[in-house]
Image: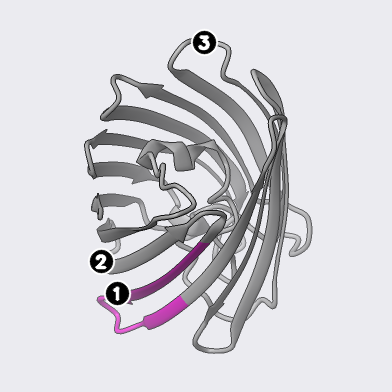
Amino acid sequence: MALLGALASLPSVAATGDDSDSDTTRFKFTPSWYSSSDGNDAVDLNLRGKRGPHTAWVGYYQDRSGYRQPRTGYEYTMERDWLHVVGSVQAANRGFLGGSINAQLGYDYYAIAGFGRTNTRPYVNLNFDPNDAITLGIGTKAIKDTEISLYHIRDDRLDTQQRVTHFLVHRDLSDRRKVSLDTAWKSGLNSDNVLVHGYQITATYMAGDVFFRLARDQFANFGNATQTRFSLGRYF
């Protein structure tokens, strides 16, 4: 689980519709409940603050087994007409440190590239993808009010053979309502060093400043449990 939530800059972030301007600090609070088939259910609380190109967050995770982990992080976003780059760093207790850089190149049609590294200390990976990894993909905004992307994340460091391919569709239904569907296919060695194949599907709906997210994930974090995740968040 020594992985970093390095993909926050990929198009899936659009599902929450964070449109804060450079003169305003906007916050997002997201409590989540994770129901696991092995009984090790968990709660997670996350608070993010964004002002212009700067975003910082704090979070806290606790599961039924008693594992607890507070965390914090920061990211900086650089945007041009054809270039969107996000660099991030993250830290957690138990000595965890990590960082990443992710980019989109293009506008109506764009390429996706990303790179992430951690110090491999114990960490609850709440992005649910291998993040000591490289990311490559493509996307388009050519369809009115719709963004579609396809990207592949591959462990290139820890010899886990873990690979996840995401197909994401995000659509603006109106100025205040948005919906997204992220379908992913995964393969790789699980926590017992057995090769597994599974899927993940995540649906997000936003109305005004409130959003709801529901996910179903086989072999969550390449463990042995199937996980159902519920999140209810609010911007303020």
Tell me residue 233's x, y (percent): 25, 52
Give 21 or 229, whichever is nearer the viewer.
21
Question: Which amino acid, mark 1?
Answer: Asp
Give 5 or 172, whichever is nearer the viewer.
172
Quick one: label 1 or label 3, which is nearer the N terminus? 1
- As helix, strand or loop, the secondary structure at mark 2 comes to loop
Magenta span covers which residues?
Answer: 55-71
Taking the view exactly as shown, the residue that stands out farthest to the bottom is: 94
Quick one: label 2 or label 3, which is nearer the N terminus? 2
Does residue 58 appear to the left or right of 128 in the view shown? left
How far is disc 2 from disc 3 in space, using C-alphas? 39 Å
Question: Which amino acid, mark 3?
Answer: Ile
- As helix, strand or loop, the secondary structure at mark 3 comes to loop
Tell me residue 162's x, y (percent): 65, 51
Q: Residue at x 26, y 29 (%)?
A: 176
Taking the view exactly as shown, the residue that stands out farthest to the front is: 23
Tell me residue 105's x, y (percent): 74, 33
Disc 1 to disc 2: CB gap under 8 Å: yes
The N terminus, quarter of image: bottom right
Identify residue for label 3.
143
Looking at the image, residue 222 lies above or below residue 173: below
Q: Residue at x 46, y 31 (%)?
A: 183
Q: Which label number is shown at residue 41?
A: 2
